Amino acid sequence: MRRKTVKGTLLVVLAFFVLPAGGSASVTNTRITSGPTGTIDTRSVTFTFDSPLDGGFQCRLDSTDPGDWLPCTSPQSYTSLADGPHRFEVRALNRPGHPDPTPSVASFTVETEPPETTLAEAPSGTIDASSASFAFTSSEPGTFECRLDSTDPGDWILCTSPQSYPSLAEGLHTFEVRAVNEVGDADPTPASASFTVDTMSPEATISAVPSVTIDTGPPRPVAGESVNLELVEGTVELQCPGEDEYSRLTSFKQVPLGCLINTRHGVVDLTASKGSSGELQEAHFWGGVFVVSQEHGDDKAVELKLAGRRMCERRGSTRKRTATVSRARRGSGGRKVWGSGKGNYETNGSYGSATVRGTTWLVVDRCDASTLFKVAEGIVSVRDFVKEKSFTLTAGQQYIAKAALPRLKPNLWP
C-alpha cells in the first residue's frame, strides 16, 4: 500500500513540472529602458523596453481597464497627446502567452500651452500710501516674474505672491506679473494693474486777494469732432489725417478724430466730450496703437480701433520667422492696448469689442485669428462679432473671440 502512495505522489509532482501553461508559470519582470519622465513640452513620446522572454509585449496608456492592453513592440510611440498627466504601462509575455503580473510603469506630464496669470489683489485708482502689495495666481504650476514701471523685456525678475514695493514715488505706477510654467513658457499676456500714489496733503492758505485771474484752461473737446490728449509718461507718438509721418506728443494737444496714436512705449490721457451736457470723460491708455473715433450726438462711445502690425507679421530672418510662427500658434504676438478710467469707451479688435464705464481692461488681436479680452478690475461688456453675442466679464475674467472657421465645399469631397 505504501509503494502505491509514493508512486502516486511522484506522478503528481512530475505532472506539475511538465504542464505547458499553469497558473504558476514563471515570468520575468519587464523593464522600460528609455522614455519621458516629469514635465515635457511636446505632444509626442517614445518608449523602449525589453525582457528576457520572447513571447512579445502588451502596452496601454492612461487606462486601468484590463481590456485596453494591446500588442506592442519596442520602441512604442504616441502622438497628439493632450496637455496634462499621462501613465504608460508595458508588460512582457512568456512563450505560452502569460503576462508579467507586475508591468513596468512610467508617469509624465505634457505642458505645451502657456499659463494664464490672474491678479487676486492689487491697488487701484489713487492711494495715499507710498507702498503697495500685489497677490496673484497661475493656472499651472511654476514660477512668477514681475516688473514695475517698465516696458523693457530685461526688467522681468523672479517674484512670489504676495509681492510688495516700499517707498514708491509720487505719481502713476504700472505693475505687471506673468506666470512661467515648469517647461519655461511664460504667459504672453501678463496681468497688470495701474495706480497713482498721492501722499501730499493739500495746504490751504487764506490771504487777501488783490485781483482775480480767470484761467479758462485747455480748450474743451467737441463730441464727434475732437479729443484732448496729454502725455502721462514715456513716449507717445501721433499721426493725424493729412500727416505723412508720426510726431511726438510732448505735453497737451487737442487733435481731430481719426488720429493714429502709438502708446507702445508710453501712457496717454485721453479726454472726450459727452455731448451737449458739457460733461467730460477721461481714461489712460498704453501698450499699443489705435485710432480714435466718435459719432456726433450725446453720450456716444469713444471708439478705439486696434491698429498696427502684429508681431507675427514682421519681416525677419528664417529663424525669426520660425519662432514667430511658433508664438502665433500658441496665441502670442498680436496687437493690443490697455485702458484704465471712467467714461463710455469701446475698444475694438478684429473679432470683438469691449465697452466699459470705469475699469481697467486689455484687448489683444492675436496672431491665431482671435481677439482676447481681459479685465483687471471693474466690469466689461464684450461683443463677439462672429457669434453675434454679448458677454459680461468681471475682474479676473477673460474671453477669446475667434474667427469663423472656413466652410468646406461638399462637392469637392467624395
Image (spheres, rainbow, N blue to C red):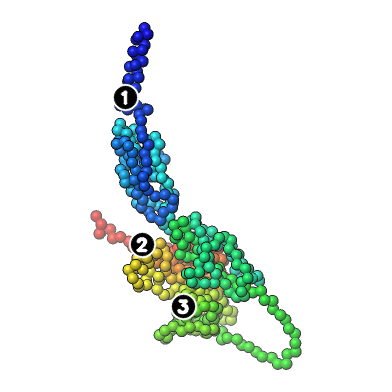
Residue 3 percent coordinates (x, y): 35, 9
- Give the class, few, some or many, for how many residues have Cα within 10 Å of label 3's Cα (few <14, many ≥20): many
Figure quadrant of the C terminus: bottom left
Q: Which mark is residue 19?
A: 1
Residue 139 percent coordinates (x, y): 50, 57
The residue that mark 3 highlights is 262
At horizontal 25% and vertical 57% (from top left) the residue drawn is 413
At horizontal 44% and vertical 57% (from top left) the residue drawn is 183
The residue that mark 2 highlights is 405
Observer able to see residue 368: no
Residue 229 percent coordinates (x, y): 53, 81
In this rendering, the label closer to the viewer, 3 or 1: 1
Q: Across the whole image, how many numbered discs are drawn on residues? A: 3
In this rendering, the label closer to the viewer, 2 or 3: 3
Q: Nearer the viewer, residue 142 or 303?
A: 142
Q: Outermost residue toward the bottom?
A: 210
Secondary element under disc 3, as helix, strand or loop, is: strand
- Give the class, few, some or many, for how many residues have Cα within 10 Å of label 1's Cα (few <14, many ≥20): few
Q: Amino acid at mark 2?
A: Leu
Report the side of 83 relative to 220 (left or right).
left
Q: Amino acid at mark 3?
A: Asn
In this rendering, the label closer to the viewer, 2 or 1: 1
Is residue 140 placed above or below 243 in the rendered structure?
above
Q: Quadrant of residue 379?
A: bottom right
